[in-house]
């Protein structure tokens, strides 16, 4: 195949006329909404139907959705929360705002939190287990749910990478105590900046509403006696999504099944291609899951090539494969000073300094050190973008193999 596609032409989200019309309509209607009506109602109902959710509230970003999840679940000062050692840092960083203690658990071969490592981390202070479904591949939910039930602790999900993914046929985010999604610009569904918190617990939902809303919306949705007195003021924060972001998002919700199907088609093609190249291997995917494929990761075996992974990617990019990438800020959390010396910015964490040492999470380290990332394309010419990058990958592998 000739390299006729220009990868710089790819756009996500694809700014369709439908999105332009949606934003224009919202500009004419309202650019600030205080309750749960209008575009917010349409978006939240659409997401609840799409992801099979009970209670849901959109937020200004994914981090605020995670913060809402933790606060809503009652996580507080001194609580230990078991989080993945390998994830984007915002999975765990809101815990510092609540005085809670993130406890890192190692990952399995897919990059997701390992239930065996989780079991080793549980203490009498453990309040919750958190799983991030890394890169869109669902983790071991049955095992984690069993652990959570046995130890009477909460199971929470960061679904930022896994919009629409399923486990045993059920949509990820729909069967834990609480879940949070990022709707940031690179995510499968995006409002530019945005997030979503969902839960099946009325109390958790009302606490999240009080955290991020006040007056009109709080008075409409907060009913438990212990909460009603605070509806006028909320807790002082404003975590509302912008209506124009919601207008960007709404048409994507309607068209999401097609986007997801096309991304999965690309992932299947890339999986077959990787299987045919010596020295590269696929990240394992269990038979009972259907990933969302936020990104497609594959593993690089240093022993099979004459160059390092970093040099390999440098060559790929020089050949025109500009979408090949090594994940950077998504890494073992003990690579970040926030987790190794939090006392420098949060003095109350002084006793936890040095808790997470280099080498404590060997599987997370190994996964991070071996993966190379590609997008999963959709929309116009989506398979051509995939074929273009596979052609370059095979060319580079032939040039650099031992």
Image (cartoon, rainbow, N blue to C red):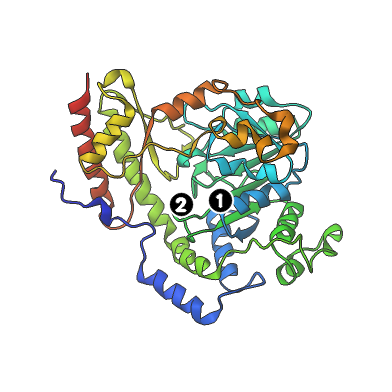
Residue at mark 1:
181
Q: Earlier in the sequence, mark 2 or mark 1?
A: 1
- Closer to us: 79 or 35: 79
Question: Which image quarter holds the C terminus?
Answer: top left
**Residue 145 circle label:** none
Q: Position of residue 165 (x, y in %)?
A: 49, 45
Disc 1 on helix, strand or loop?
strand
Residue found farthest to the front: 344
Asked which quadrant contains residue 129, the reply is top right
Asked which quadrant contains residue 291, the reply is top left
Q: Where is residue 120 in the image (x, y as percent from the top left)?
A: 66, 22
Q: Residue at 46% of width from left, 51% of height from top?
A: 187
Image position of 38 (left or right of 163): right
Residue at mark 2:
187
Placement of 127 over or under 41, stated as above or below: above
- Closer to us: 38 or 141: 38
The Cα atoms of the two marked residues, 2 and 1, are separated by 9 Å
Disc 2 on helix, strand or loop?
loop
Q: Residue at 69% of width from left, 60% of height from top?
A: 212
Q: Do the residues labelled 2 and 1 touch (CB within 8 Å)?
A: yes
Question: Which image quarter holds the N terminus?
Answer: top left
Neighbour tally class for label 2: few under 14, some 14-19, many 20 plus, Cα within 10 Å: many
Residue found farthest to the left: 2
Q: Residue at 39% of width from left, 27% of height from top?
A: 370
Is residue 76 among what the camera can see?
A: yes
Q: Where is residue 219 in the image (x, y as percent from the top left)?
A: 77, 69
- Closer to us: 72 or 272: 72
Asked which quadrant contains residue 357, the reply is top right
Q: Position of residue 216 (x, y in %)?
A: 72, 72
């Amino acid at each position: 195949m000739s390299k006729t596609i220009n990868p710089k032409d790819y756009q996500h989200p694809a700014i369709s006329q439908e999105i332009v019309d949606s934003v224009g309509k919202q500009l004419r209607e309202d650019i600030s909404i205080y309750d749960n009506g209008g575009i917010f109602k349409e978006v939240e109902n659409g997401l609840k139907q799409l992801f099979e959710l009970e209670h849901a509230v959109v937020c200004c970003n994914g981090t605020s959705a995670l913060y809402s999840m933790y606060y809503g679940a009652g996580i507080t000062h001194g609580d230990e929360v078991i989080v993945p050692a390998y994830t984007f840092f915002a999975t765990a960083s809101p815990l510092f705002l609540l005085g809670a203690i993130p406890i890192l658990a190692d990952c399995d071969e897919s990059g997701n939190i390992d239930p065996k490592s989780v079991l080793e981390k549980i203490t009498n202070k453990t309040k919750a287990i958190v799983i991030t479904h890394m890169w869109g591949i669902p983790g071991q939910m049955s095992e984690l749910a069993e652990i959570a039930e046995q130890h009477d602790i909460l199971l929470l999900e960061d679904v930022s990478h896994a919009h629409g993914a399923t486990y045993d046929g059920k949509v990820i985010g729909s069967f834990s105590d609480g879940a949070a999604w990022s709707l940031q610009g690179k995510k499968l569904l995006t409002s530019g900046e945005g997030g979503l918190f969902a839960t099946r617990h009325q109390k958790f939902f009302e606490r999240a509403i009080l955290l991020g809303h006040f007056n009109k919306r709080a008075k409409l949705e907060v009913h438990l006696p212990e909460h009603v007195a605070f509806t006028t003021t909320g807790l002082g924060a404003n975590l509302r999504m912008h209506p124009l972001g919601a207008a960007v998002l709404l048409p994507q919700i309607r068209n999401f099944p097609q986007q997801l199907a096309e991304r999965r088609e690309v992932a299947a093609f890339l999986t077959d291609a990787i299987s045919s190249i010596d020295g590269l291997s696929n990240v394992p995917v269990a038979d009972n899951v259907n990933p969302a494929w936020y990104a497609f990761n594959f593993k690089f075996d240093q022993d099979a090539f004459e160059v390092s992974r970093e040099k390999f990617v440098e060559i790929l990019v020089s050949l025109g494969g500009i979408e090949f990438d090594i994940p950077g800020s998504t890494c073992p959390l003990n690579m970040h000073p926030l987790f190794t010396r939090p006392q420098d910015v949060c003095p109350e964490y002084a006793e936890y300094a040095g808790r997470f040492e280099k080498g404590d999470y060997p599987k997370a380290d190994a996964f991070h050190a071996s993966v190379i990332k590609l997008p999963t394309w959709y929309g116009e010419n989506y398979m051509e973008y995939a074929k273009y990058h596979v052609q370059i990958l095979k060319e580079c592998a032939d040039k650099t193999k031992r």
